[in-house]
Image (tube, helix red, strand yellow):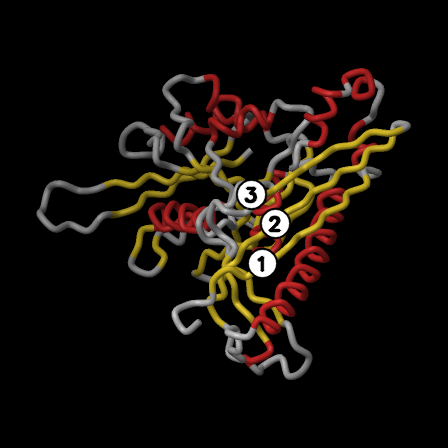
Amino acid sequence: MCLSAFLPGCSTRVPMTPILNEVESGVGYSVRQTSDVIRTKVTGDIRYFKYGFMLLGRSVAEKDLYPYLDILYRDPRNPTSRVKIAVVDGSTNEMLRLKKAGNILIGEFITRKIESLEEMSIFPELSLETMLTLLLDPGQDFVLPYLKQDGKIVDAIGVALFNGQRMTGSLNVEEAILYSLLSGSHKDTARFVRKIKEGDRSNLENYITFDAGGKKSKRKLRVQVRDRKVDVYLDLNLPVRVTEFAEDHLHKQDTVNRLNKDLSALLTGDAEALIEKLQESGCDAFGIGRRLMARHPELWKSMDWLQEYRNVRFHPKVNVEIVGAGVFN
């Protein structure tokens, strides 16, 4: 295997010396052996910082993930509580060798980017420590931040979907926001843009921008089992604030009622498509298996959950209510 290390450092010999990056690679049969190879190349030992991150190439994420993480959990010198983890569509080595993104060192840039997109409800707020229980839980899967390199730019694809310990699919940015709402893990910002009128795609009046973030949304998930058939009812009541609507007229109740109805139908359809992606990927990110283990243990033991999960009948319903429209209204 090949491992790249990102080593931020600072020279103290001369005042105002710019901070520099040192990026080294090594090849070995295990993470420990590979890190030892890197130790022979660097100016000093490798230290792990508690506010760091770990990048996994997609080719690694599509294999069994745990062997690459085992040493991080087994060695007490390795911090896990605040260390972020993300999947890269491509080479993590090449991404780290950018060294800078604009005027910011690449390590700081990636850390800031992950934290920023967590606040926008795109990335899950997950660390190596909180991820461990999900890695080992047969009743619930997880998602991870999914990044890509476009030239000298580090961009977000959305989230990577996992079945067990293997990446099996992905969601784009808007799907990732909706997933965070449906799973109840969203933050104070969860912004959408939707086309709500027929006509020219370049006409701003055909679109509405709204924010569904905050703690006022109400989510209800109910699992029902009859004759070994599993039905999941997922209801989401979503108060939203309109942040951009060029057509205006939000002072008219008829307009608000129409938008509530149209947005509810749009997001319900989006939720159905998102859940279909989760099932195709075998990603039980809502933890339906965990509920069956707790409430129907005999049924759970008799199931091949990977196969049965794809046959679960989901019934999502999103009810949108506009509760704010800015200072004009």
Characterize the local packing of mark 3: few (<14), some (14-19) or many (20 or more) Cα atoms within 10 angstroms: some
Residue 89, position as x, y percentages in the image: 57, 50
Residue 209, position as x, y percentages in the image: 52, 67
User: Given the image, on which type of amino acid does mark 1 rest?
Assistant: Glu
Query: 273 above or below 221?
Result: below
Q: Kindly report the distance in space between the C-alpha atoms of the residues bearing marks 2 and 3.
A: 37 Å
In the image, farthest residue toward the right: 227
Characterize the local packing of mark 2: few (<14), some (14-19) or many (20 or more) Cα atoms within 10 angstroms: some
Residue corresponding to mark 1: 321
Residue corresponding to mark 3: 57
Characterize the local packing of mark 1: few (<14), some (14-19) or many (20 or more) Cα atoms within 10 angstroms: some
Residue 118, position as x, y percentages in the image: 46, 46
Looking at marks 2 and 1 on the same chain, the residue that comes earlier in the sequence is marked by 2
* Disc 3 element: strand
* Disc 2 element: strand
User: Given the image, on which type of amino acid does mark 2 rest?
Assistant: Asn
Residue corresponding to mark 2: 237
- Front one among 329 and 220: 329
Residue 292, position as x, y percentages in the image: 74, 24
For the residues labelled 2 and 1, say whether their Cβ atoms are less than 8 Å apart: yes
